[in-house]
Image (cartoon, grey):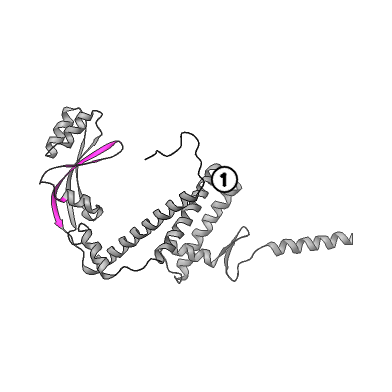
Amino acid sequence: MGQRIVLAIVLALVVSSCEKKPGGQTVAVVNNEEITAADLNAELASANLPADSSKDARAQVLERLIDRRLLAQQAKSDGLDKSPEFLNQQRRATEDLLINLLISRQTNTQQVPSAADIAKFEAAHPGVFAKREIWTLDQLNYPLPKDPAVTAKIGASKSLEEVAQILTASGIQYARSSKKFDSAMLPPALYTQLSNLPAGEPFIAPGPDRAVASVITDRQPAPLNADQQRQVALSQMKREQVNQVLSQRIKDLKAKAKIEYQPGFEPKKR
């Protein structure tokens, strides 16, 4: 009998020692699962709130974190963490996080471009900097024609009205609209091509199933000031540098890797 009492006391002590309590770096415990100060600070950061936010703000964010933790615990209880959908998305999320950290580290190690390099970059991208414009576009949105001859006629059109007539004659319905467009969104070569189009001549942007024919009806200059130009230039130059480094890294890794494809899934030879 005495041994049973001692065993019961020992078990009780073990259980109580496993029960987690708030304190120190643990700001809350949800069903014996800790939420730490680091978890809360990460949640504040994702909500664009400073780590030293007011007590009320921190309390509200903590409650949202607890709600999410409870729902996640329920999902695990239902066995969703063992489902193929979860495992696939978890692997994808992990890969995305690792790649983002790799990109962040690569960005932080890039050398800051010189003033001459920045000026050269700005000159090579006039649609983003000195000659940036806001265009007003008159547009026709239509499904891609099945007849190549109709597509050729549209491509040779000299006005949006001519495009509309061809579509109507071919029994193709279209939607007409107007929108504003920032020339900074265009690659330099395309910006030069579109800005040099004769007045009223349309350009076609085909998609997988539909195409958009557009005409520039108004152009308003919108150049950036010197400070804005430098910030935009630095951001774009860093992005291009990182993309170049990552592209080369992928090329090198593929050259060393052993990659085997199931028949029918191989990439097309170029």
Nearer to the camera, 123 or 90: 123
Amino acid carrying label 1: it is Leu
Residue 215 covered by magenta stretch: yes
Q: Which residue is mark 1?
A: 80
112 to the left or right of 105? left
Nearer to the camera, 270 or 127: 270
Residue reaching furthest to the left: 199
Q: Residue at x 38, y 66 (%)?
A: 110
Q: Is residue 47 visible?
A: no
Q: Secondary structure at mark 1?
A: helix
Of the 4 image quadrants, the one containing the N terminus is bottom right
260 to the left or right of 155? right
Q: Residue 69 appears in which quarter of the rendering? A: bottom right
Q: Position of residue 163 (x, y in %)?
A: 15, 35
Q: Residue at x 52, y 55 (%)?
A: 68
- The magenta-colored residue range is 195-220
171 to the left or right of 58? left
Q: Position of residue 137 (x, y in %)?
A: 17, 47
Residue reaching furthest to the right: 1
Of the 4 image quadrants, the one containing the C terminus is top left
Q: Residue 2 appears in which quarter of the rendering? A: bottom right
Q: Residue at x 20, y 29 (%)?
A: 149
Q: Position of residue 49 (x, y in %)?
A: 42, 66
Q: Position of residue 42 (x, y in %)?
A: 48, 64
